[in-house]
Amino acid sequence: MFKWLDKRRQRQDVATKLYNDLVSHARNPAFYLSFGVPDSELGRFEMVCLHSYLLFRRLGRTDIPGKDLAQSVHDLMFADLDRTLREQGIGDMGIGKRVKKLARNLYGRIDAYETGFAGGTDELADALRRNLYAYVEPSDDEMSAMIGYINGAIVGLDGQPTSEIMAGNVAFPQVVAGSEVHR
């Protein structure tokens, strides 16, 4: 009778695991030490946006349950951002505006990265310069490493069985400070 509650709870558990993995991977120190990403609140937000794009892109290529899972991850992300803003002392009156701005930022980045990926290396580099590297100038090696990482992540996620992702197992490429991307 209440199977829908079990399915909803299960989807929420999987979404929580995917979101936690996404955030954990986005916080990998290698991105900040070797890829030129600013080690700041904004830099970490940008890395969460980038990994959200990678996961949402993959889940968007699945059936309805995959898209529902993407929505659940999205909802968790914004609940987490709301909580973080409150912990920073932002009052109730300012939370809604800031969360809406963060949502617009995320959607803009998703569009920019999708357009950049579809357009090739130069367009992806431009999208990264406008967003991830907006306040710093990455070296050619850092930009090349980030583009390699993104391309590797897309190939890896596209090759990962949907059933694994739907079970909460996402395989982002491993990165190590001072070295190339590892799969």
Image: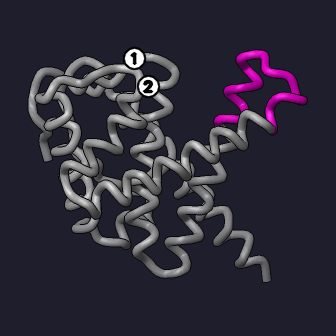
Q: Residue 177 lies in what quarter of the image?
A: top left
* Point 89% across, 29% down: residue: 93
The one nearer the camera, 120 or 152, is: 120
Q: Is residue 60 left or right of residue 124?
A: right
Image coords of residue 109 (percent x, y): 47, 47
Image coords of residue 95 (percent x, y): 80, 32
Question: Which residue is most to the right?
Answer: 93
Secondary element type, mark 1: loop
Please rate how many residues cluster around mark 2, counting C-alpha atoms within 10 Å: few if below 14, some from 14 to 19, many from 20: many
Secondary element type, mark 2: helix
From the image, tell me which residue sits under label 2: 43
Residue 21 in the magenta stretch? The answer is no
Q: Are marks 2 and 1 in contact (CB under 8 Å)?
A: yes
* Point 68% across, 39% down: residue: 101
Q: Residue 96 lies in what quarter of the image?
A: top right
Quick one: quadrant of the N terminus?
Answer: bottom right
Image coords of residue 145 (percent x, y): 16, 36
Which numbered tag is attached to residue 39?
Answer: 1
**Kind of residue at badge 2:** Gly
The one nearer the camera, 96 or 79, is: 96
